[in-house]
Image (cartoon, helix red, strand yellow):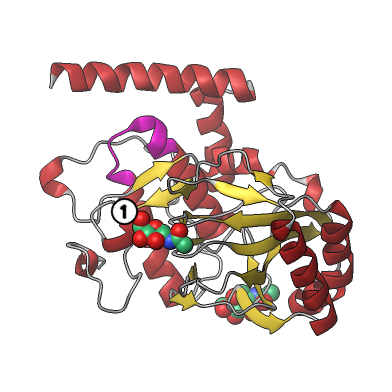
């Protein structure tokens, strides 16, 4: 107990220093800015304000509040305020599935398979949200990723109904046997409207669904086919591949855009800090906890007690507290 509370105090001091160092911000200043924007109201109106989204976000805020590690808890708040009410939504569901132009897919498939056959892959640097013993491989073809970002921009703009500014196309990542990808949302400043363009996978691949939450509070499990594009509002809709991939390789390219109209006039990260209420680090005594325990790794989410460390990865999967959402 002693050690625990000393640890929390140290963690809090550390967090204070970290915030001050990274953002030139003290907790006092942060709370002032919070009160200017929100008064004492909590929670602000969710965006969108559908019953399903409200249920999902209320539950997530409870899970975050019940976390013990203060540093991770703050990170949990940062991610959740942006999802729940800071970032606007631009579509009804936050996600949509389309087919890529067939000739583009065929070209990419041919080039990636050739690169693999010729050993022209490298290791990707390690990424917090990606698990598994083998890391990921990577094929560097900036000419092709540039083609993807440019050719698909009109499709993305049509989906979202507004002009977009391209940020980057990241690829081509090859997930390897036993990879998984924790649930997460993307960078609040720049990764707003995104796509997962699934190019190809080895013949021995087993189905490996993407999980994604929509604005009605549903979690979808989507098995992308080669040539499928999943559009999604990536700083808002939690997504990942929490179950393990089995097979030799599975490749996609990730493309991110942000709205051209005034989006960069706001410092969206600072707004996340300011949106967190003053009482964010309130401790919930163990006997009062009602939620499935949540863990935050970097910016990604895990529920260690559930199958695949995430609730709802299969219709039949149940984790102990799934039904207590309220
Ligand atoms: C935001 O989501 C809500 C709920 O799905 C929807 O009614 C609304 O039209 C969406 N906003 C935009 C700009 O599409
Ligand atoms: C993937 O890993 C599993 C578990 O270790 C193993 O049984 C399987 O043979 C591996 N598959 C490939 C394609 O390496």
Residue 128 screen position, x and y as percent: 50, 41
The answer, for residue 187, to whether it is visible in the render is: no
| Front-lying residue, 115 or 38 | 115
Location of residue 181 in the rendering, given as x and y in whole percent from the top left corner: 48, 55
Q: Is residue 234 visible?
A: yes
Name above or below for residue 292 compared with residue 92: above
Q: Residue at x 71, y 41 (%)?
A: 267
Q: Which residues are magenta?
A: 65-74
Q: Is residue 32 magenta?
A: no
- Which quadrant of the picture is home to ligand 1? bottom right
Viewer-nearest residue: 284 or 79: 79
Q: Indicate the quadrant containing the N terminus: top left, top right, bottom left or bottom right.
A: top left
Give the side of residue 60 with respect to residue 273, left or right. left
Residue 180, image x and y in percent? 45, 56
Q: From the viewer's perspective, is residue 261 above or below residue 107?
A: above
Confirm whether the magenta stretch covers residue 70.
yes
167 relative position to 71: left or right: right
Where does label 1 land, which residue? 303
- 22 w.r.t. 106: above or below: above
Closer-to-camera residue (247/188): 247
Crowd class of label 1 (few under 14; some 14 to 19; many from 20; radius 10 Å): some
- The spot of residue 178 in percent (x, y) is 43, 56
Residue under the point 25% across and 56% down:
292
| Extreme-front residue of the structure | 118
* Relative to 315, 277 lies left or right: right
Say which quarter of the image contains residue 111.
Answer: bottom right
Of residues 41 and 194, the one nearer the viewer is: 194
Question: Which quadrant of the view contains residue 37?
Answer: top right
């Amino acid at each position: 107990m002693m050690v625990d509370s000393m640890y929390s105090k140290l963690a809090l001091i550390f967090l204070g220093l970290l915030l001050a160092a990274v953002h030139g911000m003290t907790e006092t200043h942060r709370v002032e800015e919070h009160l200017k924007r929100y008064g004492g109201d909590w929670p602000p109106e969710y965006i969108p304000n559908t019953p399903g989204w409200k249920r999902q976000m209320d539950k997530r805020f409870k899970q975050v509040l019940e976390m013990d590690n203060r540093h991770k808890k703050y990170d949990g708040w940062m991610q959740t305020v942006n999802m729940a009410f800071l970032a606007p939504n631009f579509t009804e569901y936050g996600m949509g599935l389309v087919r890529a132009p067939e000739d583009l897919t065929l070209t990419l498939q041919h080039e990636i398979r050739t690169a693999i056959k010729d050993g022209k892959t490298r290791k990707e640097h390690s990424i917090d949200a990606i698990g598994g013993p083998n890391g990921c491989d990577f094929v560097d073809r900036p000419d092709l990723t540039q083609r993807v970002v440019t050719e698909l921009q009109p499709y993305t703009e049509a989906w979202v109904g507004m002009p977009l500014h391209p940020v980057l196309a990241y690829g081509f990542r090859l997930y390897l046997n036993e990879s998984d990808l924790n649930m997460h949302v993307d960078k609040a400043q720049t990764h707003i409207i995104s796509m997962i363009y699934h190019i190809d996978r080895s013949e021995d691949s087993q189905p490996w669904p993407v999980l994604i939450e929509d604005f009605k509070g549903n979690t979808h499990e989507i098995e992308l086919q080669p040539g499928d594009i999943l559009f999604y509002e990536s700083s808002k809709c939690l997504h990942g591949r929490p179950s393990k991939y089995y097979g030799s390789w599975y490749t996609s390219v990730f493309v991110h855009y942000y709205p051209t109209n005034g989006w960069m006039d706001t410092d969206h990260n600072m707004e996340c800090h300011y949106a967190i209420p003053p009482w964010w680090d309130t401790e919930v005594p163990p006997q009062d906890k009602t939620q499935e325990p949540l863990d935050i790794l970097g910016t990604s989410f895990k529920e260690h007690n559930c199958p695949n460390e995430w609730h709802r990865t299969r219709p039949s999967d149940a984790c102990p507290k799934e039904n207590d959402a309220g």
